[in-house]
């Protein structure tokens, strides 16, 4: 990281002598967060150069995917967007609740605006805002006032500071409209301010100084969050999938599993959505991948825990909170299906079964030398860096549906799968535009004698208004006996072992014996599974206030010599997983009304 920050300082130094006279001051700063701030200053310099040359600027972060043409929005031609054509600055937001993003709502002003999508019009207002933005960052840099937590600060942080200090007023407000029209050179009546549903724009109460002298008021508004979408709205709430057309831009925010080496989580989410185009043809080639393995049917059967009684905290890796809470989870016996939806133990308990099914699928993929097509995954609770409310991110709608089809990085550390070189593909793989259509029909179905027919698990459409087409029937079937060892499946397939796609029902897979054929093979597999499916990065789910549980529990090891005399069921899998030690950390909280208020 220090090397990259140093590179930012070198870039600032190499540009010494340019406009503004700040390069020499930046060049002598030590390594640390200052490098990131220096890069932010250079970014704004870059914007200023283009605006000064007479250009409008549309800038986006590298993790923004453009799906449609944004010009109808910045030119005011999109329905309800006429006033946007007269704004100096348009910016996206981190709003995660579309109810707060109505045309005349001002709630976005109190949320985080996200400069990941930023439109700068060639106006004096834009010049004044850019100058104030750069000046704010330079003041922090040159005065040595960088905060202790400034590792979390960047140019977007200072942009938000500037916007919140502007004292924005809606231009339709009485006393502002005609003044604003005059500033834009518009005649009264040339723009209709009374049209219902038109998105509002906002004008600063006071003018900001211009670099060339004088001052200018700034007109700014937020781009609509449905069309310029953040990661939670698109990947977690799936709001766009119920609507058409798709968003204009998709910013992969609110996600996990990125590292300094690569944005693993962002790429995986785009692969799942069918929007990633960075994979070559070999990625979709069955022959080069050893063929693909597809799991059919839900990983967790709806009735699999019906009537089961377990210790409430059975699936937690760690429990912390008040003594009353930790005692309850360690001693209270419950029916997990009856737990309320805001109890994270519901999420962790059902996920034990989901992880076990995924472990078995990975074992079959290894035994047959195939690449697993990850099945659709389910979350019974959201994931977030801070406190949850009712098992949902605090900024999300209270009515957000639980459970939901969740991205891989909500449950797993995606980068570890890359490090362990475990070949998998996203659940949407067969429907990707680059996937050969013949793959969908070149499927062989593996059945276990005496098993029931498995229904297809729900698969979200890849784009709004684009439902997933049903797959054709498998071209042939092979049947094996219950309890067959996974190491014997390849031979049992006979001539079908070279099929491009092998599929098996999740329920049938539970009736096979998870044994890779030797103690060493089983040990090596268990070692990899502990890394992939265990709590490498423990995730905290708070229940109420400081009471919380941590996940996720890995499945029990298959062991060197698995017992193939009986098929496992949900109760046994929970019991096996619970044999891992649960850590609990009770602490006393004295009654403190002020403390309770702060937590709320």
Image: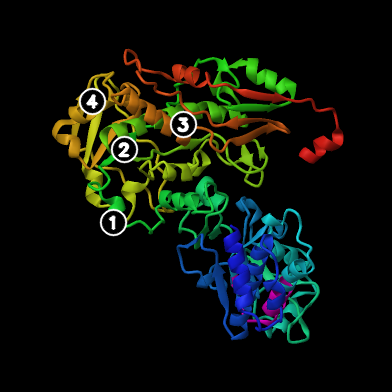
Residue at the (66%, 62%) spot, across then down: 31
Which of the two residues, 296 or 177, is positioned nearer the viewer here?
296
N-terminal of the two: label 1 or label 2? Answer: 1
* Residue 270 visible (yes or no): yes
* Residue that appears at 68% across and 70% down: 220
Mark with earlier residue (4, 2): 2
Query: CA–CA distance between discs 3 and 2?
Result: 22 Å
Name the one closer to the observer, 545 or 303. Answer: 545
What number of labels is visible? 4
Mark 2 Cα shell of 10 Å, populated few (<14), some (14-19), many (≥20) = many
- SS for callout 4: helix
Q: Position of residue 71 (x, y in %)?
A: 51, 73
Answer above or below: position of 387 versus 36.
above
Label 1, label 4: how many angstroms apart (C-alpha)?
Answer: 31 Å
The residues bearing labels 1 and 3 have C-alpha atoms spaced at a distance of 32 Å
Q: Which mark is residue 294?
A: 2
Residue farthest to the left, as pictured: 495
Circle 1 sits on which residue? 281
In three-dimensional space, the C-alpha distance between marks 1 and 2, rounded to whole angstroms, equals 20 Å
Q: Earlier in the sequence, mark 3 or mark 4?
A: 4
Quadrant of the image for the C terminus?
top right
Instruction: Please provide percent x and percent y for residue 22.
Output: 71, 77
Q: Which residues are magenta?
A: 119-133
Magenta stretch, main secondary structure, is helix
């Amino acid at each position: 990281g220090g090397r990259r920050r140093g590179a930012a300082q070198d870039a600032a130094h190499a540009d010494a002598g340019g406009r503004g006279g700040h390069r020499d001051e930046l060049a002598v700063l030590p390594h640390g967060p200052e490098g990131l701030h220096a890069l932010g200053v250079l970014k704004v310099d870059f914007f200023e150069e283009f605006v000064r040359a007479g250009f409008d600027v549309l800038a986006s972060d590298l993790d923004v995917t453009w799906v449609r043409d944004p010009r109808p929005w910045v030119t005011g031609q999109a329905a309800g967007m006429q006033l946007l054509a007269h704004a100096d600055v348009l910016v996206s937001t981190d709003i995660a609740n579309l109810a707060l993003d109505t045309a005349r709502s001002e709630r976005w002003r109190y949320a985080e605006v996200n400069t990941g999508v930023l439109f700068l019009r060639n106006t004096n207002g834009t010049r004044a805002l850019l100058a104030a933005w750069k000046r704010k960052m330079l003041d922090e840099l040159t005065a040595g006032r960088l905060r202790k937590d400034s590792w979390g600060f960047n140019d977007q942080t200072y942009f938000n500071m500037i916007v919140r200090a502007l004292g924005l007023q809606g231009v339709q407000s009485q006393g502002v409209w005609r003044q604003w029209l005059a500033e834009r050179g518009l005649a009264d009546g040339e723009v209709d301010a009374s049209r219902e549903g038109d998105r509002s724009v906002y004008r600063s109460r006071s003018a900001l100084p211009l670099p060339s002298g004088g001052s200018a008021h700034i007109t700014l508004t937020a781009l609509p969050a449905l069309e310029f979408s953040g990661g939670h709205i698109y990947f977690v709430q799936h709001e766009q999938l119920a609507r058409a057309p798709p968003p204009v831009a998709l910013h992969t925010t609110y996600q996990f599993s990125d590292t300094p080496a690569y944005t693993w989580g962002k790429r995986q989410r785009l692969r799942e959505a069918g929007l990633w185009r960075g994979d070559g043809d070999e990625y979709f080639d069955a022959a080069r991948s050893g063929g693909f393995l597809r799991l059919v049917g839900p990983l967790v059967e709806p009735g699999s825990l019906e009537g089961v009684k377990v210790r409430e905290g059975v699936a937690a890796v760690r429990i912390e909170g008040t003594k009353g809470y930790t005692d309850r989870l360690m001693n209270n016996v419950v029916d997990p299906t009856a737990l309320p939806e805001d109890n994270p133990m519901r999420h962790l308990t059902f996920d034990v079964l989901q992880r076990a099914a995924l472990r078995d699928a990975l074992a079959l993929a290894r035994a047959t030398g195939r690449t697993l097509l990850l099945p659709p995954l389910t979350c019974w609770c959201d994931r977030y860096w801070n406190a949850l409310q009712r098992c949902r991110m605090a900024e999300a709608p209270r009515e957000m549906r639980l459970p939901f089809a969740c991205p891989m990085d909500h449950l797993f550390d995606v980068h570890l799968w890359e490090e362990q070189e475990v070949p998998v593909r996203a659940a949407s793989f067969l429907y990707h535009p680059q996937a050969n259509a013949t793959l969908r029909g070149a499927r062989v179905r593996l059945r276990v004698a005496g098993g029931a027919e498995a229904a297809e698990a729900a698969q979200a459409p890849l784009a709004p208004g684009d439902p997933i087409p049903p797959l054709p029937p498998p071209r042939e079937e092979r049947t094996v006996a219950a309890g067959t060892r996974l190491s014997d499946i390849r031979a049992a397939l006979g001539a079908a072992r070279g099929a491009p796609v092998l599929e098996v029902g999740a329920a049938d897979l539970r009736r096979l014996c998870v044994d890779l054929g030797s103690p060493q093979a089983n040990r090596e597999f268990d070692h990899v599974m502990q890394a992939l499916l265990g709590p490498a990065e423990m995730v905290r789910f708070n229940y109420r206030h400081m009471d919380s549980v941590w996940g996720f529990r890995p499945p029990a090891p298959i062991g060197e010599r698995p017992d193939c005399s009986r098929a496992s069921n949900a109760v046994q899998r929970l019991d096996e997983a619970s044999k891992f030690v649960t850590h609990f950390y009770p602490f006393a909280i004295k009654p403190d009304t002020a403390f309770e208020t702060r937590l709320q």
